[in-house]
Image: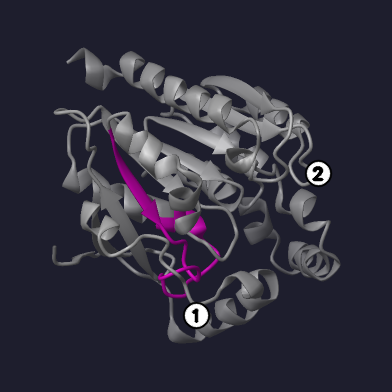
Amino acid sequence: MAMLTYNIKRNNSINATKIFQFLKRIFFGRFMVLWKNPLSQDKMKAWNEALVHSASGAMIKIFYSKPRTVPRPKGIMVLGHPMGKEAKGYFIKRGHTDILIENGYHVTVFDFNGFGQSSMGSFAFHEDILAVGAFIRQIYPGLPIGYHGISLGGQSGILALARNRNIFDFAIIEATTTTLYEFWRHYPLQYLLLSAGKFILPKSAKGYNFIKRSSDIKDVKDFLMVYSLDDKYTPVKMAKKYQQHISGSVEIWVAKSGGHAEIAKSSHNKEYFKHIVQFIDTSIEKSKWNQE
């Protein structure tokens, strides 16, 4: 299939892009590498590809698929990856995509700007999510749509869901920090830069207070917060904070182990995937889409 391209307004200058690129190399440099597709050429036949313009100033690379086992899809799941070299391949390699497709969902994975096959943009990763959501909504209109974000994908998801342009009906937020400072305090150089930025650009710093912005989420009815007991970066107490701030229904599921953002590879992965699918099915059954 020919690659599709979807355009939205871009607001990033060339000079700004260079600045963002420099700063991003400090925070994410070791993860912004040449991307290796985990799918063979034969398996890629089950996926469509697209490029989407994001308001972050980047071109976002998307893979989107159709369910293989049911005649009528239940809905759409958009998956936002954690910080890492695998980018969108994270979900492919750990089984998220296959399990969701087998359970009757359209699945969309993408690379945040600067990662994988996407070009460099600003730190507004939430704009990448909104751009992908708008694109896939046009491809599959009339279906309920959910978002699953892990770590970087989770915190960016919180910001996207709090925007008026949000189109997601429900969300899974996994291994997600409540503020940038709580996560990056484990990395001295990055934490120092963040602390300086708090005083130099106070308005921007406030915009990335995820726990505070979560109170602005209005149209998302159901949340599943997924955390691990042995995650030193995003402990379970963060899920409880989100539960207190988000107005919708918030369920918390905790794995006994899995470290940071790796429950899918842990000994609890079967229970993990079972709970995720059950949550998605239940959220769709409760949605207005299923009642029409």
What amino acid is labelled 1 in the image? Thr
Q: Is residue 23 left or right of residue 56?
A: right
Say which of marks 2 and 1 sits in front: 2
Amino acid bearing label 2:
Lys
Which quadrant of the structure image shows residue 220? top left
Callout 1: few (<14), some (14-19), or many (20+) C-alpha neighbours within 10 Å? some
For image coordinates 76% across by 62% down, the residue present is: 198
* x 33%, y 48%: residue: 108
- Mark yes or no: residue 164 visible: no
Report helix, strand or loop for mark 2. Answer: loop
Residue under label 1: 17
Q: Who is closer to the viewer here, 203 or 150?
A: 150
Question: In the drawing, does residue 32 fall left or right of residue 73?
Answer: right
From the viewer's perspective, is residue 278 above or below residue 89?
above
Q: Quadrant of the N terminus?
A: bottom left
Between residue 176 and residue 246, name the one nearer to us.
176
Residue at 46%, 68% in the rendered image: 116
User: Residue 153: image x %, image y %?
Assistant: 53, 50
Q: Is residue 104 above or below residue 82?
A: above
Q: How many residues crowd around disc 2 within 10 Å: few (fewer than 14), some, or many (20 or more)?
A: few
Question: Is residue 113 inside the magenta stretch?
Answer: yes
Q: What stretch is highlighted in magenta?
A: 105-128
Between marks 2 and 1, how big is the CA–CA gap?
Answer: 33 Å
- Counting from the top left corner in percent of width and height, residue 165 is at 36, 44
Which numbered marker is on residue 232? 2
- Is 91 left, or right, of 44 in this rendering? right
Q: Which residue is drawn at 73% across and 34% down?
A: 257
- For marks 2 and 1, the one nearer the N-term is 1
Say whether marks 2 and 1 touch (CB < 8 Å). Answer: no
Front-most of residues 207 and 224 = 224
| Label placed on residue 221 | none
Q: Where is residue 10 in the image (x, y as percent from the top left)?
A: 35, 69
